[in-house]
Amino acid sequence: MCGTCGCGSENNGPKILKPGEHKHVHGDHHHHQEGHAHSHATHHHHDGHVHTHDHSHDHKSKVLIIEQDILQNNQVLAARNRGYFEAKNIFALNLVSSPGSGKTTVLERTLTDLKDQIPFYVIEGDQQTMNDANKIDALNVPVIQINTGKGCHLESDMVFEAVKKLEMQNNAILMIENVGNLVCPSMFDLGESKRVVIISTTEGEDKPIKYPDMFHTSDICIINKIDLLPYVNVNVQKLKDYALKVNPKLQFFEVSATTGEGMQAWYDWLKIPS
Ligand SMILES: Nc1nc2c(ncn2[C@@H]2O[C@H](COP(=O)(O)OP(=O)(O)O)[C@@H](O)[C@H]2O)c(=O)[nH]1
Ligand SMILES: [Mg+2]
């Protein structure tokens, strides 16, 4: 899984902070298993011995079991998050995309336009900085930043801790902006009600088939930056066709978060999701 990107190889856990809060908080208890898995996955033998087939086979199966444990543990807490959201009638969205597709900009515009109609809460995930949380805080919407350090995705235990800090009222919408990455976040259920993948027109139409897991596991696809269509060589219909190939149930919204074009359809869905 994340063995290729080094995710979780650092020992200190995620930092879960409110804007203005001091950086120390939550401990070193995350990622221990993941680090373990990765050390197996990246372990090289320098002893010059020829390894038997059996040995390497056994080695691989251990890695597989540990990775299954991580995903299984994540799934257990995700189910707990989901139960909590359902009991409080909180509609939780997991926003995923590559870095720079416009997750924060879509969020800022949505909150600006709808925050007087619906109570919103936000969890921001990034490896470093409070930048995105500060932007949400400036809109007076309650927000928690999770800094994952080396981690390339949010996990359900991080969301669990952040949710405890948010003290949400019932009948609200929780927006979770995941770490910008089209690969690893697809494997980690956070307990969200719906998963929203954002792709911008500058990324090219073939990304859904290059990163199929992310599009396969999402419910909604926001195609952002349509204001740039005159300047980029992209065929939106082709992009949609590719996305539908990996997920025939995907529902699309074509928007520009900066001009506001197309945003109303997304708002209508948010109010009465189908
Ligand atoms: N032209 C244009 N730029 C956008 C749009 N949405 C976001 N951007 C810009 O794209 C950059 C990255 O956006 P950001 O929201 O930070 O992306 P994130 O990394 O997915 O959160 C910023 O410079 C935004 O101003 C859009 O609809 N049109
Ligand atoms: Mg962002």
Image (tube, grey):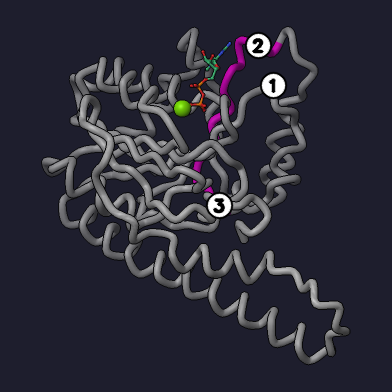
x, y percent for residue 195: 46, 46
x, y percent for residue 28: 34, 56
Instruction: Please report whichever mark, 2 or 1, sits nearer to the chain's N-terminal start.
Output: 1
Q: Residue at x 53, y 46 (%)?
A: 152
x, y percent for residue 188: 48, 57
Identify the mark at residue 202; answer none if there is no mark: 1
x, y percent for residue 235: 76, 24
Which residue carries the number 3 mark? 7
**Which is closer to the viewer, label 1 or label 3?**
3
Q: Secondary structure at mark 3?
A: loop
- Mark 3 to mark 2 CA distance (whole Å): 33 Å
Direction from residue 234 to residue 137 in the image, left or right: left
The residue nearer to you, when weighing 40 against 204, is: 40
Q: Secondary structure at mark 2?
A: helix
Direction from residue 67 to residue 22 in the image, left or right: left
- Type of residue at label 3? Cys
Q: Secondary structure at mark 1?
A: helix
- Mark 1 to mark 3 CA distance (whole Å): 27 Å
The residue range painted magenta reads 217-229
Q: Residue at x 49, y 7 (%)?
A: 259
Dot 2, how many residues are within 10 Å of its Cα: few (below 14), some (14-19), or many (20+)? some
The residue nearer to you, when weighing 145 against 198, is: 145
**Would you say the beta carbon of the disc 2 residue lies within 8 angstroms of ligand 1?**
yes
Residue 74 versus residue 260 in the image, above or below: below
For the N terminus, which image quadrant?
bottom right
Disc 2 and disc 1 in contact, CB within 8 angstroms: yes
Q: Is residue 122 magenta?
A: no
- Mark 2 to mark 1 CA distance (whole Å): 8 Å
Instruction: Please report whichever mark, 3 or 2, sits nearer to the chain's N-terminal start.
Output: 3
Q: Is residue 139 visible?
A: yes
Instruction: Please report whichever mark, 1 or 3, sits nearer to the chain's N-terminal start.
Output: 3
